[in-house]
Structure formats: structure tokens, C-alpha cells
Amino acid sequence: MAVSERLQSMFFVLTSAIAAATVPGCGDRSGIDGKKPENVAIAVADAPVLEPRAMTIVPGIHMLGGLSPSAAYVVETSEGLVLIDSGLRADAGPVRADLSTLKLEESRVRAVLLTHAHGDHTGGAGYFREKTGARIYAGRADAAILEAGGPREAFFSTFHVPSENPHRTTIDVKIDGGESIEFGDARFHAIATPGHTPGSVCWLLEYKSIIALFSGDVIMGLVGDLNSRGEIAKPLGTYSAYLAPRYRGDATAFLTSLRALRKLDRVDLILPGHPRMDSIPTSPAISRKRRLEMIDRGIADMRSLISRYQTDGANHLDGIPKKLADDLYYFGDRDRFAIYGLILADRFYLVNAPGGPGIVDFLREGFRKLKIEPLVPTDVILTDIGPDETSGLKDLLTQTQVRIFTSAEGVAPIKNRSPEGTIVIAANDSSISDSLGLSIEPIALRVPGRAPLVWRIRLKKKSALVTGSLPVDVDQALEADFVRRFSENEAAIDDSLDALDQLRGLKPDLWIPTVAVDGQNACLYDNSWAEILDRDRSLIERARSVNRLLKQAKTHSLH
């Protein structure tokens, strides 16, 4: 670790310790002890379950639950209204509507306390600054992003939000953690909780003897989405720590933040960033036991993730060249397509040749970034013979002689578009490993494509699976197109479902997709491979249902 990094780490630990020592109910319990006064216990016990509507939690503390996908909160103080977060919309329309429902005048908003930079929490803050003179508070490490209004992924992560664009928001007060801010009879304590984003802040409120924690997306929900799987379904916002670095999550920082939150002895109410994600609407007055259990699960998850990153590397396919495993390298993306290579002794096996002219120069630059002596490809392994996979072949073949390995169906088309004398080998027999000089197995799948193949490669300690059109780690932006592709090709549905069943049994350690989505991690952990296949299956089944509905509608219109 560099000296500057050590100093930053020491500063974060020190400020966290100071915050823990000075926040009510934390550490030595200075200020307020861990027991609720009787009148507070009664009020908290009456707190309603959190529903997707404007509602009063306890007198003076309200949830603006009509917002989507996040919630915001408002506290009535003797100096005016204090908002915690401000929704997605730049005009703050849903926030204003919920304030009106609660009979609260938007003109009385005096401050907006932001929990982090994501757009569904920060969108409306600037409106209140302009219209009411409200001061905006945000974590220092998120302030630059908010004031710049970009990049987009810092505001929307991997989520598809085509209707909204990031915009600049002036931050009046930059928060480091440990500050206490008073608005009349309400005192807010800032707890720096980086991890979901670098500038995430939890706000601990002292108000009429009640202690309430506005957790933002450090704690997104109180039970989570019990009907879904994956990190995004969990109540804590740790999902961002699994994403590529450009989305600004950090497992080590999140672990430190959760340990800091665990030291809070007394929290009467936990008011999360996304209560509508909970499958079971839940009261924010959860017990200390339940709170610690939830935090401890997050601590275990982050410790496990950190250990895996240390052991395997954080192998995100995010455009940055890196070594994925022994002999296997990622060179980055070219025209949306990921480029990989295997290096054994003096042979360089290129996986597909996408991107058109310039592929040799692209590879040379990748070798420079990897700090490896550059090699020219000796062999090309194709997952299909379409233009996406082969547009760089012509340029490659003018500069070097390579052997091309494809399916039996792909041999003739590749020969027809290659210079005379090009060696094209059908990868359909058991001797292919001997021909290539590495432990590799071609697997024919009946999936969309011209001559598709999947390649299973056995490395020194791991196995890798190189795939083409299926499976896909479908995100929100791709979902509609993925379903449409299959709804327009009914013949491919059954074959693709069979292919997913076939792939399920392979259980690779690394997945090497032709198109990497959202900088996905090449490493597969726990049930992630099965979850990806299940998600694809569900979407293909949806395409079948769409097909049936379209046929029924067509039949109905004919009659």
C-alpha cells in the first residue's frame, strides 16, 4: 500500500472511531443510554409498516413513500422541514406531491441531507435549493460527482433509467463524518459509511427522545426481496461492492462501515433507502437483535468477497486489460465485444476476432498495458462465424498466418472469405486438444447463430467456459431486446432452453462471454452460474408467452 493510501486508511479509521465515540448510543453510550424511555417505547411500538405511500412514522417524522424506486423522509423541526434524500425527478414532483399529502408546505424546506450520490436519492435536491433556499449536505467523497453531474454510471449504477439524465447539484456543506447538525429541536449526527458509494452517509437523528437512523442504501430494506435471488435482493446495499470499480462500490470500505454501524447500541427506528423492495412490508422499529443479525450477514458477505478478490483477483470485464487466470488474459472491449487470449509458451490463442481493422494494434496496446512482451496470434478460436465474431479476421490475416478453429458448419464459409491457403480446422473431434496444444473441448449447442460453439478450457487450477450468444448476463437495458429476439424466433426457444440445461452441468470457475455486460466479473461464485442460467430461462419463457399472446391476438383479429 502506498504511503498516501495508508494515510487515507488511517484517517478513515480515526474519523470513524471519533464518530463512534461521539454519536449517541454508540460505543460508551455517552449522551443517551441504550434504553428507551417508556413514552418513546410506546410511540415506536406504534410505528406502522412501511408502505409505498406518504405516511407518518411517528409524530414529526414522515416517509415520502410515493416516490419510486427509493423513498425520502422529512422531519418537522422548529426551524422548518428537513428532507433526507430527494427522489429521482429533477422537478421533485413526487416529493412535493407527498409533502402535500402530509399537509406539509414545501416552502418550509430548510435543508436536504443526502445519503449518497445515486440519482434516485439526489434528483430533486437542486429544486429545493433554488425554490426555498434549502442548504444541501452530502458526503465529501460524493460531492464532486454531484457537482459535476456525471458520469452517468455514478448516478444510476447498472440500472436502466432512460427517462432521466444526471444534472449538476451544488453542495453547500461537504460531510466527512462525525459532524452534528442542529435544526431547532432536531439534531442529526453524520456517520460516514462508504462502501455503497465513497461518500455514503447515514444520518442518526435525535428527536423528541427518539433515535432514528436514516440509512440510505447502506441498508436498502428491512427484509429484502424474498422472491428474488442475487445480491440486489438483499436488504443491505452491498450489491455495489460486487460491481466493476466504475460503479464506485468498495467491499473493504463497506465492511468498515458495517462494523461502525454495529457499534450503535440504540436505534429506535431504521428508515431504509428502498423500503418498497421488501417482500413483506415491515415496521422500522426492528429489534436490536434483528438489526445486528442483518448487519452481521453483511459483514460475513463482505469478508467473503474481500477474501475472494484477494485470492482470485477482482476479474471485472470492464475494458481494463488484466490477467484472469493462469495463461488466460482479457485485453479489453472493442466495439462492445470482449477480446481474450490464451498464452502458452510461444503460442497466442485469440478468442474471436471482432472489431474490424486495427485488431493487431489493439492487441499490441493490450500487451503494453499488461506489461507483457507482445505476441502475434498463432490461432483463432471462434464461438461463431458471424460478422461480430470475425470482422477483424481480414486485417489479422493480412499481417500474420493463423490457424482458425470453428465448427464443421463454419469451415466452408470461413475459407470462402479468407485468403487462399488459410488453415481452417473443424473443431468437432476428440483430437482438437492435440491440434491446439492445450486442454480444450468444443461443445456444439443449438442456439441462435450461424455455426455456434462453446469452448471449455482446462487451465492449471481452474476451468473456463467461452460462450457466444447464450447465456447472457442480462441487465435492465438488455432485457426487452433479449425477450424480443426470442419472441421473433420461436424455433430457437426450445433449442435454447435445452442448451441452458446442457450448460448448467458444466459449472465453470470462469465465464468468458463474447459480450461482457456492465463490466461483469469473470469469476463465478456460489450459485451465480445457476442464477444467470435461470434468469435467461425465465426471459426465454417470457418470450414464448409473448409469442402465444401475439398469435392469439392475430387469430382474434382474423375472426
Image (spheres, rainbow, N blue to C red):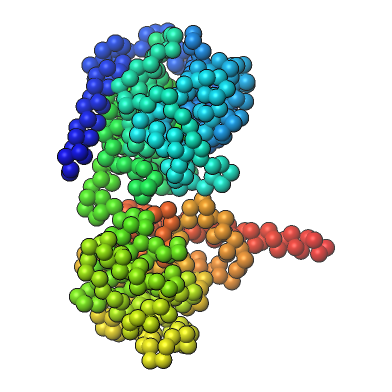
Q: Is residue 452 visible?
A: no
Which residue: 53% across, 55% down? 479
The quadrant the N terminus occupies is top left
Q: Is residue 441 above or below residue 319?
A: below
Q: How many marks?
A: 0
Q: Quadrant of residue 68?
A: top right
Q: Quadrant of residue 297?
A: top left
**x then y, percent, for residue 556:** 78, 60
Which residue: 30% across, 76% down? 377
Which residue is most to the right? 559
- Observer-nearest of 472 and 334: 334
Q: Is residue 187 above or below residue 280?
A: above
The quadrant the C terminus occupies is bottom right
Q: Is residue 432 visible?
A: yes
- Observer-nearest of 555 and 137: 137
Which residue: 51% across, 40% down? 166
Q: Is residue 241 above or below residue 83?
A: below
Which residue is most to the bottom? 421
- Observer-nearest of 556 and 384: 384
Which residue: 33% across, 31% down? 193
- Observer-nearest of 158 and 43: 158
**x then y, percent, for residue 331:** 33, 64
**x then y, percent, for residue 435:** 28, 84
Q: Is residue 263 left or right of residue 470?
A: left
**x then y, percent, for residue 517:** 43, 56
Q: Is residue 391 left or right of residue 431?
A: right
